[in-house]
Image (cartoon, grey):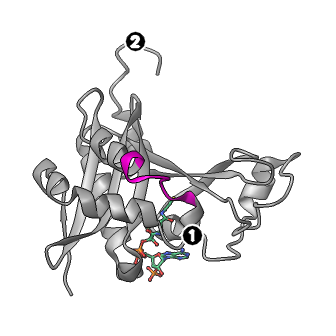
Amino acid sequence: MKFEISPSREEILRHKDEIVAMLQDFSPSSHAAWPSAEAAAEEVEQSMREDVQRISIVAMAGGRAVGWVAGLKMYSYAFELHPMVVRHDWQRRGIGRALLKAFEAEARGMGALTVYLGSDDHVRATSVGGTNLFPDVLGRAREIKNVKNHPYEFYVKCGYEVVGLIPDANGKGQPDIILAKSLMRGDVDEREKTPPLRDGVL
Ligand SMILES: CC(C)(COP(=O)(O)OP(=O)(O)OC[C@H]1O[C@@H](n2cnc3c(N)ncnc32)[C@H](O)[C@@H]1OP(=O)(O)O)[C@@H](O)C(=O)NCCC(=O)NCCS
């Protein structure tokens, strides 16, 4: 069945309960699911606040939400993506990739040069879980392997690079895997065109 992608606030509000249900399920990584419907609803509501530049995009199929991604501007030129979910029975059909593409287009439109995110490993699903990562954390990041279907590889397949690890971020042996993607085209030339920051720090 076909799916469509929309950043419209009305669509997100219309599908809010379905998005909440996906966040509470968060299958197959249910340990990372939102603990209550209230907490999940707060996450969805937050994605539509206007305090900072935010992005919130829903994927729909057959009139129901089947995926959702959100994020916000965290640096002058970088957006953090969080969270990202595709309904478990709709996974591996290209919806995640389409949501990422739409997120990146929105972020680029708001002036971002980089999108980044953290992808936790709570359950030794990668070679960097369940182990002491010091010393040479970056060496461990460089050699990361997927052991049990961890989503970091999904982002790699969509053009993201592992740019770091936060050791023990969620407890002993439970790191956060940090990934990022450049939104610039033509690298150096585009970089030269980057407008200076208002405070002149660049
Ligand atoms: C991770 C997730 C968003 C991916 O969405 P999806 O719609 O299944 O992904 P797509 O079908 O667009 O996949 C794009 C590519 O990534 C691959 N891929 C998807 N999930 C993967 C995984 N867990 N491990 C390895 N590769 C994966 C697909 O096979 C596909 O590869 P291909 O281009 O070579 O065919 C989805 O599985 C999900 O919601 N998981 C539960 C919640 C979660 O973990 N969110 C991310 C937290 S950081």
* 78 or 85, nearer to the observer: 85
Does 19 appear in magenta?
no
Q: Name the residue that disc number 2 marks.
A: 199
- Which comes sooner in the sequence, label 1 or label 2? 1
Q: Position of residue 57 (x, y in %)?
A: 25, 55
**Residue type of the residue flagged with mark 2:** Asp
Quadrant in which residue 16 is drawn: bottom left
Q: Position of residue 161 (x, y in %)?
A: 56, 58
Whether residue 196 is visible: yes
Q: From the top left corner, tell me how far across and down residue 143 is, in percent.
A: 76, 64
Toward the top, the furthest residue is: 199
Separation (CA) of disc 1 from disc 2: 37 Å
Q: Residues within 10 Å of mark 2 (few under 14, many from 20)?
A: few
Q: Secondary structure at mark 1?
A: helix
Span highlighted in magenta in the image? 32-39
Question: What residue sits 32% from the left and 27% below the top?
Answer: 195
Q: Which residue is mark 1?
A: 153
* Residue at the (79%, 54%) spot, across then down: 173
- Specify whether tag 1 is near ligand 1 (CB below 8 Å): yes
Q: Is 38 in the magenta?
A: yes
The quarter of the picture where the N terminus appears is bottom left
Percent of width and height locating residue 185: 35, 52
Callout 2 secondary element = loop
* Vertical comparison of 82 with 197: above or below: below
Q: Nearer the viewer, mark 1 or mark 2?
A: 1
Say which of 27 and 103 sits in front: 27
Q: Amino acid at mark 1?
A: Glu
